[in-house]
Amino acid sequence: MSIKFYAKHVYLLLAMCLASSMIYAQTTVTGTVTSSEDSEALGGVTVVVKNTQIGAFTGEDGSFTLNVPDPNATLLFRYVGYQDQEIALSGRTTLNVTMQSDFALDEVVVVGYGTVRKSDATGAVTGLKEDDFNVGVITAPEQLLQGRAAGVQISQNGGEPGAGSTIRIRGVGSVRSNNDPLYVIDGVPLSGSASTPDASNFSGIDAAEAKNPLNFLNPSDIESIDILKDASATAIYGARGANGVVIITTKKGQAGKGALSYGTFVSVSNVLNQLDVLSADEFRAAQRDVQTFFNTDADPNNDITDDQLAARDFGANTNWQDEIFRTALSHQHNLAFSGGSNSTTYRASLSVLDQEGVVINSGIRRYTGRINTTHKAINDRLKVQMNFTTSHVQDDRAPIGSTGGFEGDIIINALRLNPTMPVRNPDGTLFQPQDNENRNPVAFSALTSDEVTTLRFLGNLSAEFEIVEGLKAKVNYGLDNARSDRAYNASPNRFDQTGNGGRSVIANRVLASELLESFLTYDVYQGDHGLNLLAGYSFQSFNERSSLIDRTNFATDEITGTNAIGLSSDEGTAPSSSAQENELQSFFGRVNYSYQGRYLLTATFRRDGSTRFGENNKYGNFPSFAGAWKISEESFMQNVKALSGLKLRAGWGLTGNQEIPNKLSLESVGVLVDNNGNNTGNAILNGNTFNSGLGLNRVPNPDLKWEQTRQINVGLDFEFLDGRINASVDYFDRVTTDFLLEIKAPDPAPTTNVFTNVDGEIINRGFEFAITSVNVDKNDFRWMTDFNFTTISNTVEGLPVTRINTGRASGQGLSGTLVQIITNDEPIGTFFGREWTGFDENGVSTFADADGDGTADQVVLGNPIPDFTWGINNTFTYKQFDLSFFINGVQGNEIYNNTANSVFTRVGLATTRNTSPDAANSAESFGNALSFSSRFIEDGSFIRLNNATLGYTFDASNVEWLSNLRLYVTGTNLLLFTDYSGFDPEVNTDANENNVPSIGIDYSNYPSARTFLFGANINFN
Amino acid sequence: MRINKIIYLLFCVAVLTPLACTDLEEKVLDETIGEGLLDDPTNAESLVAPAYASLYFVHSGPGGFWGISQHTSDETMGPTRGTDWDDNGVWRVLHTHQWDPFHREVEKAWNDLNNGVARSNVALSRLAAFPESADITRFKAELRFLRAYYMFHINDLFGQTPFRSEDDNDFVTPPTVLDRRGAADFIISEMDAIINDLGTKAEVPYGRISKGAARMLKAKTLLNYEVYTGEAKWGEAVTACDEIINSGEYAINDDYFANFATNNEQTAGDEAIFVIQYDRATRTADAIRFWCMTMHYNQDIGVDGFSPWNGFTTVAEFYDKFDPADERLTDDRIRSTHGINLGFLEGRQVGVNGDSLTDRAGAPLIFTKEVPLFGANESQGIRVVKYTPDNESGIQDRGANDFLVYRISDVYLMRAEAHLRNGNAGSALSDVNTLRQVRNVPDLTAATLDNILDERGRELYWEAHRRTDLIRFGKFQDAWAEKNGSTPNANLFTIPQAALDVNPNLTQNALPGGS
């Protein structure tokens, strides 16, 4: 970039600010450019005088003004996605041009604080439009993307309606900090916190897995989702960009005739598969084997008499899984209307979703409303936008999850409960085993209710003013407020509560965030040079509050305890509450420069400050640089006809992560408490009076600083046959350093652990490949294929500590077993333990002992990071029919099947627990231990027919009031090919230890469902 | 144009207003920052409390300091019972001396003890700034005792004691490490330095550190001095014990199990020298779980819905060291209220109403002496219930029983041992028989190292002394049930890898070499 060029633009800017303009003494040609496709105006088209450096871009309305030295010059119109057009002026001064579109329209992708044509993007960005979204019973927006975007791995944490998802963009980049991407909805970045109270802060309650915080959005309000993957794209979000950014843009109204649309579906779901356990008769036979075993062993004390054996048979034949699973019905209704004048446009929508879960007494009901309006004034120089959405989500949660213990979980009980037990007593009341060990899951579910109601409001108001042409100022104010109430009631009639008199818990959570941003943009095009500048300021505050009342001893079950908590005659645990807030303040800027439309440079910079860091490191700087070269625009490429587009992209950038708890940089003194709020420093010092011990709860670390991720991205975009085939391939190298970690404090220290920035590297490297192809396009038939493929290798290096343990196994006999480690030269989440080699002659597990020291070796048993993931979608349209099917797959990851470890062994039969036929028929001893080993590490690879949709669009041309009617049938989760023995290999039970997250552990997971859905979309005139 | 300008101006204001920046000062809403809280002399006693509170963590089972001291000895075993108590082998490797630097209970012991040192230091550093008074002087002496007490066990378990003075508030820099002699000498000098600042038993509230406790810690250090340094100090150990016995403050309680009753602050008489106080009303850490970890699931001690954990047992050879008439072996005083006896639980078990109990499969519950370490069934192994299970606590895994850390019976046996090793067999025999006479067991005819060790086992079982004793008597590497023996390396635990990683001044101890 020459100084001359700069000077010219500074001059121009000044000139414009003075509201005057230079007049060249030349012929002025004006005109508009429209698209052949829809006759809409085309903005951003390059108009150049052929064989000169003179040129201009069209404005948003498609108009251009160009000073031409020669009235007979030839003008060249160029716009990516359209065919180049040359028009000789022949003395004309007005020119209206229609450009013929290439095969694929050039998409606009949303990047931070602006948009960019896909062809001009320098970073790795995947943009998905409504047509690309998954179809089905969708509760949260990321489900729309699952499998669709290269480099983005999304897996549902379980099959519960509204369950959370695990989203990893380009691998796992952080040990402890949040690995979730940043979500930006219509310009408002969301807080990463959960919006519903989870069970982690009140123990012994059964449903634990966090619900999805994005459930509040109505997926049919979403116009596009853009995923910023590499650092050059995400660095504009600085401190929160390290895990990628997902930008969600909602639908806006269009000027012109109003539109009213209605969409609905009804769906039927069933559990995908049941796990194989012994039937009642097989169980009786197995119990006779148990008797034979114990009556023939050396110990006469453990003999089982015939009477005792008979007592183990309760006479019924129950398939417990049949009892807790059901055919679930769901339906959804969407109503939207939009329209507007040239100055004001609006779109409003309402939706209702009522989804039943495939497990009894579970489901989700969601009501949403949205109004998006835009108003333009002052000759369209002022644009005011308001986007408001509010939602009411009610979750009915099933008692499933690891925190409830073995007895408080209906899945585990359905798998292992004695199948000769009846569901009901002869008198019709629910049967409840009278011991501390067994629970009838039907009774347990009926006598437990757990309802979470979440009300969330998200709105933003923005105003954009064009000060002079090309220079715009924008202010954006956003508000996000989520209020959630959880009411948990365990009836006093539930057997385990009879001594307690029932238990009721009220938990509340309020999440509030406020955003204020202002920024300036300046666009200028001069000849071969295009310049786009951005400078801005952002302030966002986050406030979280929660409270909890946990009570037992209710005299009656007549009234739901949470409705009248005062009826509890017991003080129980003291009520508790917490309140925290943090703030982010940022300054950011970006320069986009293009030369001749083929050399593109982007530089961004963001300076973020956070209250979470100490005096010494409040601010972090996050720069990025990227460039792109449209090789196909070069003259030497013009003869390569088949390759109509070729672009090379390269970028480098730094991003940060600040997802650590608040308050770490401050010393905390006071009554000593542990992480769960229990007092740890209290002692009896004088007689029987208790003394609340004072001390240091937290040793401050004022040097704590931002975790940094450096990412390099190199990519190539190809376009063949005028856009009929589009492909891109990217290589990324993502290295996280200075990671924020809680490690052991050098003893003796007042706290066991301290937060610090640990030297070391987490390296994610991989390739992404994506291709979109129109295979056939003849007459009435069109066949399109989208395919994406991602490979990631993840390694940890330079960690100064030997191991960080996580992955807490659940179940009896597995207490305190940690199955995953983070250690040098292995991927994050490596499974570590003994390698199982089978059973010895006594049926006891044997383990590999390679070094022969007499103890089984602890070795690496695999890791939960896939070698590659892929997705393929085929769409066929024939006349008014459309058919699509989507298959996705994950290859090369391991899963720890904790459910099998605790239930599917032969050992449980000895204590009258049910098990799988494989285990029952194995050579395993009844006295074997349930220890964790490679025996329960399984291959988690799968191929899934995720989605198939057949649709028919009626010809409505002769119906005056109807513009469009489409009926469709969709099947989701239709086929699953996997060797994994659990319900579904797509699983992620939270088994964190000391807040270091676990990956790829399956314990008592809500099973996934197969769903058939019948839907209609109607657009009225 | 004018309006344009106004709008332009308004916009500039709107855009620029937010630029009035925040200073990003973090606001804490739900914690007391507690400015000045620790510098207020009226809070002095509350500063002392956490150093005491660490005792709850150190001495509560099933793992941690108590667990690793018991399970590595011949007194306790944690057999894996079918689906239960595998816990990835943590209990078994303690029994067979096959632990490694990643053992979670060893790490818990290390953390709990070091935390106790740190808490003492935090309090000492604040108390140093308080105006002198009799109370402050005594508090400081108590804190120095507690710090030394935790360091004694770190030294005993690991042989390396990371040390910061109370003035060192930089908790990020790795501290220096005292070797075994360094730590032992430090403890002795500290006890000498504080003895005059501490009160007598009568002068301090029940449960607080008195001169007796300081003398006892000194005596324990001297008794083990040869293990730590190779240099024996038997004469000084005798003197230290003499000071306790001659103080006249303590006497052996002739009702053995009264020492461990729920109201033992009254019933233990003058037995206790250093206790950890528990009560029912308030949750004090994990409190006493000793009965939960040993009794069978169905032994509900008369409390509806209470189900113990059916875990740990004693080892058959250890049980056989008892004379069947020894009153420390078994006692029926709580049979009618709890269904169980106190002491060692063997044979058929009954409920409160006298009916036979069954195991979970319905077979009669009969505790047998022999128990395999792996693949045990529910009823194998003799259980040990020394502390009276508190069936009125409301939370049945906790109780009001105070835990006796140091008691006078131990002092007689310590002095006997020191006398014997010092060549004074007569005084040794007299001390042992003093205790045996109170326990109503026949006098020994001669004091030997073997029978003093056995007597220590019979008197002090499950009180976390056994590992140290076995090492001092050179028997820790021996084979016993389900353990084939180990190497002298076993005398020290491996330092938790996590601690080693952050302090380069520590060096790893060798693996124990057990099998």
Image (cartoon, helix red, strand yellow):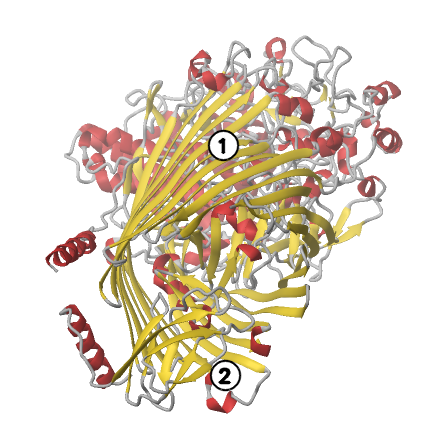
Q: Which quadrant of the structure image shows residue A891?
A: bottom right
Crowd around label 1: few <14 · some 14–19 · many ≥20 (10 Å): some
Q: Nearer the viewer, residue A119 or B314?
A: A119
Residue type, label 2: Ser
Q: Nearer the viewer, residue A103 or B347?
A: A103
Label 1 sits on a secondary structure element that is loop
Image x and y of residue A989, in percent = 58, 44
- Residue B95 at least partly seen: no
Q: Which residue is mark 2?
A: A632
Residue type, label 1: Ser
- Horizontal relation, residue B461 to residue A877: left or right: left
Q: To which chain does the residue with label 1 belong?
A: B
Residue under the point 67% across and 29% down:
B319
Q: Which residue is mark 1?
A: B60
Q: CA–CA distance between discs 2 and 1?
A: 74 Å
Image x and y of residue B107, in percent = 50, 46
Image x and y of residue B430, in percent = 51, 27
| Above/below status of B431 relative to A699 | above
Image x and y of residue A932, in percent = 67, 47
